[in-house]
Image: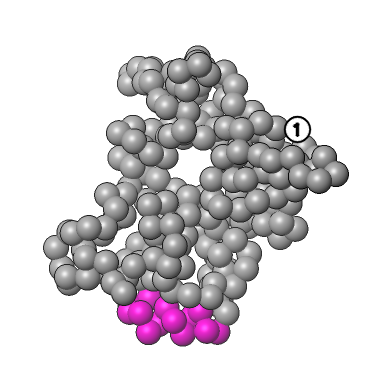
Amino acid sequence: MHLKRQEVPKNWPVYRKGTRFVVRPSSDIARGIPLLILMRDMMGIAQNRKEVKRAIHMRNVLVNSRPAMDDKGSVLLFDVITIVPEKKSYRLTLTEGGKMDVQEIKDSEAGSKVSKIRDKKILKGKKIQLNLEDGNNFLSEIKCDTNDSVVVNLKDRKVEKCIPLAEKAKALVFAGKHAGKSGVIKKIDLDKGMIELDIGSDKGIISVLIKQMMVTE
């Protein structure tokens, strides 16, 4: 089933004019973008869907260090896409205007990604399960709280470290009217679920809902 071009999420960098339909992602339509659109329309490394499917079939495309299985599969914020023959890796990011974008990254950066902790649970045996914004869940002994972020080792599939939600931490807004803005946290109001984010000396400070941002460093 396809998606009408006029109905695609506003953060997809696709033209509103053109063919009537675009591919519908198999999941996470609000948070991700189909691998097909990313490779063909954003990265320009494939001319058509047939080429993307062939690359996937030959296991030439990795998403977060694992072979891609479906051209409709969603690529999410900060996911790593590796093109095996070219030995190049890219990360899905946001432009300052809130549109999805891809940036080439170094090999040393391709083995990990940052993700926000949506919530956490205590399982039997007092084991802590972290439920992340990207849908992944991890058991971890690293001390961290909801709304903190974690660095995930994509090869070993484990949490490497916690990035606390704290003043002076760097953060990115991933949703809402300020999506794409990044800066340094100046103040946190947990009661109101808000932060004040300094996005630059010439741009001032903006107020952002904690649920719409994530700490990155």
Residue holding disc 1: 143
**Mark 1 nearby-residue class (10 Å; few <14, some 14–19, many ≥20):** few
Identified at 64% across, 28% down, the residue is 164
Above or below, 146 relative to 105? above
- Quadrant containing the N terminus is bottom left
Q: Residue 158, can we see it? A: yes
Q: Quadrant of residue 44?
A: bottom left
- Quadrant containing the C terminus is top right
Residue 67 image position (x, y, % from top left): 59, 73
Q: Residue 198, can we see it? A: no
- The total of numbered circles placed on residues is 1
Identified at 46% across, 68% down, the residue is 73
> Relative to residue 65, is residue 71 drawn left or right?
left
Residue 81 image position (x, y, % from top left): 52, 62
> Relative to residue 73, is residue 139 drawn left or right?
right
Query: Which residue of the protein is positioned furthest toward the right in this rendering?
Result: 125
Which region is colored magenta? Answer: 46-58
Identified at 50% across, 16% down, the residue is 191
**Is residue 156 or residue 122 the one in the foreground?**
122
Residue 175 image position (x, y, % from top left): 38, 39
